[in-house]
Image (cartoon, helix red, strand yellow):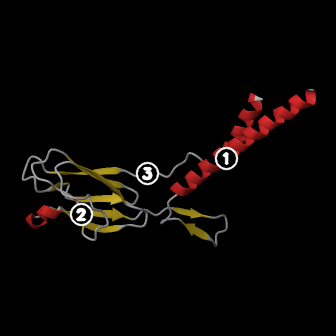
Amino acid sequence: MKRCFIVLVVIAVAISGDIGLLEDEGEVHTITVDGFGSNLRFVPDTLTINEGDTVRFLWSGQLLPHNAIEQNELFNSGEAMRNVDYTYTFDYNQSGVYEFYCEPHRDLGMVGEITVDNVEQENSTVDDEIETKTGDYSNEGNSKLNLTILLVMVFVMSILIYLRTRVDDIAEI
């Protein structure tokens, strides 16, 4: 029975496709506050990243409270505080230039800029006339769906194996 179960699990994983091949989550880039100078500057104050990357605003024990707010409020770390650990992940359709600032110190020049480069992934079909581009597509939902399908298949297969052994036990009586 164990052998049959293992075979069914292997088959289920094989037919589930790219299960376990999650899309690259991107890099994490950290922006801090200049703690050795004026305490009124983001470090770095300009950053270039790719779509799918995460920006982490991180500072602790600062003399002055700070926050990070994107000009159009795409992201907002909240009220100015001396300790902040806030992250924002740019989706695969958010390329562009984003200016941000510290609300209490904006007039003192505490501003920054994040440039998000477009990441385009191309897939083409066998037919040369048809080309499918997935540049603005995130695969995270599909991977979760595949994992769910796999788990349901394993559950159903387990029930079928259990019922099969019960039928064999009844047939022996």
State whether residue 8 is above or below residue 112: above
In the image, farthest residue toward the left: 38
Left of 133 or right of it: where is 166? Answer: right
State whether residue 6 is above or below residue 52: above
Q: Nearer the viewer, residue 123 or 156?
A: 156
Residue 17, percent from left and from top: 64, 50
Left of 37 or right of it: where is 57? Answer: right
The disc label shown at residue 69, or none: 2
Q: Is residue 170 at least partly visible in the picture? A: yes
Q: Label 3's element?
A: loop
Q: Residue at x 56, y 45 (%)?
A: 20
Judging by the rendered image, the residue that carries numbered circle 1 is 152
Q: Where on the picture, by quarter, is residue 132?
A: bottom right
Q: Label 2's element?
A: strand
Residue type of the residue flagged with mark 2: Ile
State whether residue 2 is above or below residue 86: above
Q: CA distance from mark 3 to mark 2?
A: 23 Å
Residue type of the residue flagged with mark 3: Glu
Q: Where on the picture, by quarter, is residue 96?
A: bottom left
Q: CA distance from mark 1 to mark 3?
A: 26 Å
Q: Is residue 18 at least partly visible in the picture? A: no
Which mark sits nearer the N-terminus, 3 or 2?
A: 3
Number of numbered labels in the structure image:
3
Judging by the rendered image, the residue that carries numbered circle 3 is 25
